[in-house]
Amino acid sequence: MSELVTGEAVALELRPARLPSRALAVLLDLVVAVLAYFGVSIVLILTTASLDVAARTALSVAAFVLVLVGGPIAVETLSHGRSLGKLACGLRVVRDDGGPIRFRHALVRGAIGVVEILMTFGVVACIASLVSERGRRLGDVFAGTLVVRERVPEARTAFVPPPPPWLAGRFSGLDLSAVPDGLWLAVRQYLTRMQQLDPQVGWAMAERLATDVAARTGAPVPQGVPPAAYLAAVVQERQAREVRRVYASGATAAGSAGQPAGTDPTNSNSGSGSGSVTGAYAPPSGPVSSAPAYGGGTGGVSAQGGAAAGEPPATGFVPPA
């Protein structure tokens, strides 16, 4: 993963293309260019039979330059960095700042490519790509470009585990407006990866994040509540508020259009109370025993397994006395 920073100070995460995929794309482009050059050469031979040798030689050189050099430059310029080979391999040429290339970028890449690809059979380009940290050849270095992968497998959506039932709605009165987005992102990343962390390290991270969130909200973490459970409950409260805000705006728009307020406009079978805003935010139902144990069982938090009939299911927390 390569992090590029645009002129607007926006960080872009791009995946630079590796040498095998780039070599395959160049090979496909060369095959197409050579076939086109042979076709143009045959046409020139048939149409310039009456000319002398010097004129035919000049036309052959001009056809070579136009097809094998000018053709790739024109294709990359018009397609904004996607030639036929790169399109087949899922690659694209972009600027160092992540923007689309222009004619001057394609011209520099094509001119230097004649030396490092055509004249040296790609040896110089391979060596430069292997030495470069982002796999750039000399043409990319001088043109200020980078070949990246466009078809990147989508990452699975990270699952944020829900808080234990005895914390549902406990933090509805917290003021979460002062918590910055960066801290929310850190909390979500911790909650989605805490099962992969060492128990002691995960507990320390949860305490630090809980302290930061509590400092922003102005209310301390309640005693007896594990820090990971506190973070999960606060995140769920924030998500519930966002959903209520979205549905409230949708209900307002529906009311202005003649639909009764308080109903879900996406639910065609909404009956009495079925589409109400409050009905969409009930705590998650189902067996709570499948919820992960926050904190890894350290710091006085113990998992309860195999609950007997009539007892509350195990949640990974010991409810406060």
Image (cartoon, rainbow, N blue to C red):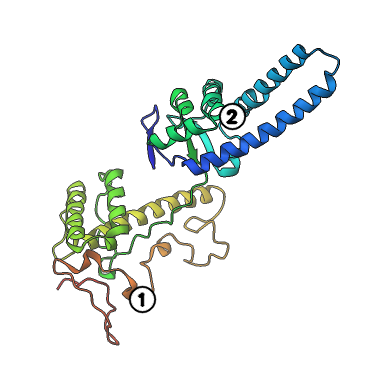
User: From this viewpoint, is residue 172 visible?
Assistant: no
User: From this viewpoint, is residue 317 visible?
Assistant: yes
- Contact, mark 2 vs mark 1 (Cβ under 8 Å): no
How much space separates mark 2 and mark 1, taking CA atoms? 56 Å
In the image, residue 94 sits, relative to residue 24, either above or below, namely above
User: What's the mark number on residue 106?
Assistant: none
**Could you tell me which secondary element the residue under label 1 belongs to?**
loop
Query: What residue do we see at 54% from left, 57% from top?
Result: 266
The single residue placed furthest to the front in the displayed view is: 53
Q: Considering depth in this image, is 255 or 141 the residue closer to the camera? A: 141
Question: Please, what is the three-letter code of the amino acid marked with disc 2?
Answer: Glu
Q: Considering depth in this image, is 70 or 11 the residue closer to the camera? A: 70
In the image, residue 205 sits, relative to residue 179, either above or below, namely below
Question: Is residue 198 found left or right of 22 in the rendered image?
Answer: left
Q: Mark 1 points at which residue?
A: 287
**Could you tell me which secondary element the residue under label 2 belongs to?**
helix
Q: Of circles 2 and 1, which is in front? A: 2
Q: Mark 2 points at which residue?
A: 76
The quadrant of the rendering that contains the N terminus is: top left
The single residue placed furthest to the right in the displayed view is: 50
How far across and down, in percent of the image, does residue 39 sit? 76, 30
How far across and down, in percent of the image, does residue 203 sit? 18, 60
The quadrant of the rendering that contains the C terminus is: bottom left
Q: What crowding class fits label 1: few (fewer than 14 Cα within 10 Å), some (14-19), or many (20 or more)? A: few
How far across and down, in percent of the image, does residue 124 sit? 47, 30
Question: Is residue 47 found left or right of 202 in the rendered image?
Answer: right
In the image, residue 52 sits, relative to residue 274, either above or below, namely above
